Image: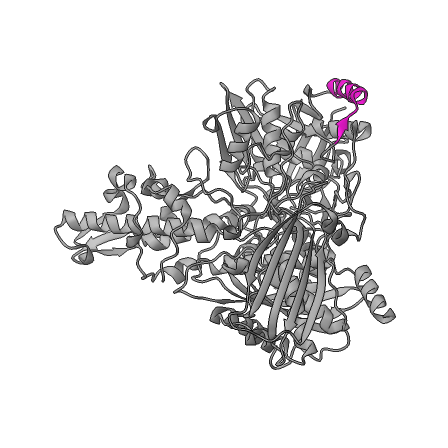
Amino acid sequence: MATEIEFILNGRATLVRADPEQTLLDVLRNTLGLKATRLGCGTGQCGACTVIIGDQAVSSCDTPMWSVAGKELTTLEGLGSREAPHRLQATFIEEQALQCGYCTSGLLMAAAALLKRNPHPSVPDIRQALERNLCRCGVHNRVIRAVQKASS
Amino acid sequence: MNAPPIPENLKKHPRLGQWLDLGPDGRLRAYSGKVDLGQGISHALRLVVAQELRVKLDQVVMVRATTAKSPDEAVTSGSLSIQHSGAALRYAAAQLREVCRSRFAQQHGVPPEAVELDNGIFSLEAGRFTARYQDLVDDAMLAAPIEPRHLRPSDGDRPRLGAERRPDIEAKVFGQFEFINDLALPDMCFGQVFRPKTLGAKIDEAAAGRLEDELTRLAGVIQVIRDGILIGVLADAENVLAKAARKVQAADPWRGTADVPPARAIAAWLKSQPLETSVILDQRPQAPVAGPVRVFRAEYERPWLQHASIGLSCAIAQWSDGALQVWSHSQGIFNLRRDLGLAFALPAQAVTVSHCDGAGCYGHNGADDVAFDAAWLARHAAGRPVKTQWTRQGEMANSPLGPAMTVAVEAGIDEAGNLRSWKQEVWSQGHGSRPGRGETPALLGAWQTENAFPVTMAVNASLAAGGGSERNAVPPYAIPEIEVVNHRVLAMPLRVSALRSLGAHLNVLAAESTIDDIARSVGRDPLEFRLAHLQDERARAVLAEAARISGWESGTSRGAGEGFGRGIGFARYKNTGGYCAVVAQLVMEERVKLRKLSIAADLGLLIHPDGARSQLEGGAIQAASWTLCEAADIGPEGVRSDCWESYPIFKFSEVPEVEVALIDRPDCASLGAGECSIGPTAAAIANAIHDALGVRIRAMPFTADNLLKIVQADQAS
């Protein structure tokens, strides 16, 4: 049954009525209208729905709402804006690090979580941090360059 | 620049106003029937228009393609958007520019040559008189037919505009881009169509009845619809459909199996099916030549592959007053409109299909089928728009597969060790079962309703369009005697259709592996051997450039230690498109570790060099993934590989370094970039593995297991 769940979303205290078993992705997209986070598989295998909870990159498609109560969440909408871009957003644009862009939100969030933990990652660190994010267009090298640039 | 060939689509849509007009804000609007599939084509087309009009980029707006207004340019496929739509828009923009120049000259009683044009401003007498496009364009101008004579060779703006970045990338990076999956219409409801995983399945009526009752009782379900073997659910919210999906999965009311070959029996299966055989080329020697002194024979194979887009197929449909409106990420909105008309017994004019961007598309995926699903559900939604999005499992189980193939090559050499004869024989299902081409709808759902249409058998595109399974089966080398034969397999236990580059993936791998084997066995360098058999200067130049950037001649890519290998591959896509050569460097670890791909390409006049580089690199990485690790797992129950664990694709740890070199040819017509690196990359990898191991692997994917079997067989022989 629906219940009230409180958490901090993109820096703002947020209260939603949701079924505790409902996925975080469903609530983000369909209740809160935050659509930058994308559904790719629904089973945490592709990374398209990656958000940051605390300082960890987490798949939101298989994260139940009960588990986010009291937590601090960041989605792409909270990462930066055109006026005040996160440095990864700036370097993704510089490197034109996407083709279709469906995996991009998840990649940005996974990379942002990496830079929080490790401000100066090596290329192997970057590859490892993005290993759970799939890209089919083949822009991996551009993404790696963008993350390197953002951390230098 | 040499004028590009006049595209057929320009002949079909000859009026200037069908390609360009003036928007209410004074900016120029450009119309194309080609659509964005993640490849950035609308940006490249916009650059073409801005270049020809000599205006700033922000003065040109690309109008999103819709059957209500855009020119019908059939399907966005085959790396033809730049060649066709780009050429049409170039002719249209050149005409608009010159007609406006003449109009302005006429107004001032001067010859057109006296008029200057800079940044969209026509001027006379050093700016004493000026006019903009919006001051000069009128209806008569737009109603006039396009005459190709207006295109002229000067194009000073090209490098500056070519450096402009794709604006959609910024929107995507800030989470502001609206994919079709994000589109929401007022009063919209959500629907899902549930179906079996095999084409000939039947439904167990009792089980279906129980399931219908269960679904009807589910909170949030508006309606359950049964038609033939389809079960549709309309709901108030997307998450209700996920609950419905779990109930359907548990009940699984369908019975039926697909007559698929056992694993590792693909070649035998393909050859034993009913075949439609056609001779693609039968080139006899012009003068009598001696018979071959040695003949090389080998057979190559690829399994069924999956498109495996990261996004999900999605559509929205709405009926009002007997007319159907559909929003779709289809590659062919006019083709989809036609087949929706056939499926619902509507005249094409009663159907409007508007394009909305989806996730990356690499061939005929579920986009058209889900549009049928949405339209079929929306008929029961009392005028409300219905959004339908396939699940990951549905996407991978029900989208068409890329066809399996077998290619046999038999090549003879003469006394001097040069190529004398070549026979290439292809066995494969057709590579296209797209909508818009037959008398009945090529839409999965239309084959599954009560009044079902027959399943559309996959066919091959005409040779003029580059063919399907026989794409690139004609080798690019100068050989006195060439015979190329295609056997279309007339069985389709699971649906197949177009996957990026069609038959070129295996045909190029087969030809380039054979070339390498011959070069090595006669003691010649594989690069030199290729160059010795190529007469086309542009082909020779890309090979030389790939060799240069990879350090081929200097041997610096050699000597990197045990298990290291390098290989080269070349093709001109479809034998008429982009030229591409690739050098692969790899190391044999517990499996193939691809280190670097060096790509050189000649795409004629470059429009957006960064976009071209990205397409070449992306094509190469996708091809490397197919070649090294992908194979659809199929069984009597259908496609088993319906998630990312059962169908793994390249991950960040597997992606090699990639270097791309472009040869700009401002004097040659522009060529597409999206598919030309696929075949050469696969071939370069195969040749590098041979270089590293000393044995030839011919059946994809080149996984550790498959390599081990080849090595063991080689040692045993």
Q: Residue at x 81, y 65 (%)?
A: B710
In the rendered image of this protein, does residue A97 appear above or below residue B712?
A: above
Which quarter of the rendering shows the N terminus of chain B?
Answer: bottom left
State the residue in front, B143 or B450: B450
Q: Is residue B485 left or right of residue B563?
A: left
State the residue in front, A87 or B133: B133
Q: Residue at x 40, y 50 (%)?
A: B7
Q: Is residue A116 left or right of residue B588?
A: left
In the rendered image of this protein, does residue B523 appear above or below residue B62?
A: below
In the rendered image of this protein, does residue B490 appear above or below residue B627?
A: above
Q: Position of residue B279 (x, y in %)?
A: 58, 55
Q: Is residue A148 visible?
A: no
Q: Is residue B635 left or right of residue B676?
A: right
Which quarter of the rendering shows the C terminus of chain B?
Answer: bottom right
Looking at the image, the residue that sits furthest to the right is B716
Residue B202 located within the stretch drawn in magenta? yes
Q: Position of residue B386 (x, y in %)?
A: 59, 26
Q: Is residue B433 visible?
A: yes
Which quarter of the figure has residue B407?
Answer: bottom right
Q: What type of secondary structure mainly makes up the magenta span?
A: helix
State the residue in front, B42 or B260: B260
Q: Residue at x 52, y 28 (%)?
A: B341
What range of the chain is rendered magenta? B201-218
Which quarter of the figure has residue B160?
Answer: bottom left
Which quarter of the figure has residue B371?
Answer: top right
Q: Position of residue B607 (x, y in %)?
A: 44, 58
Q: Position of residue B601 (x, y in %)?
A: 52, 65
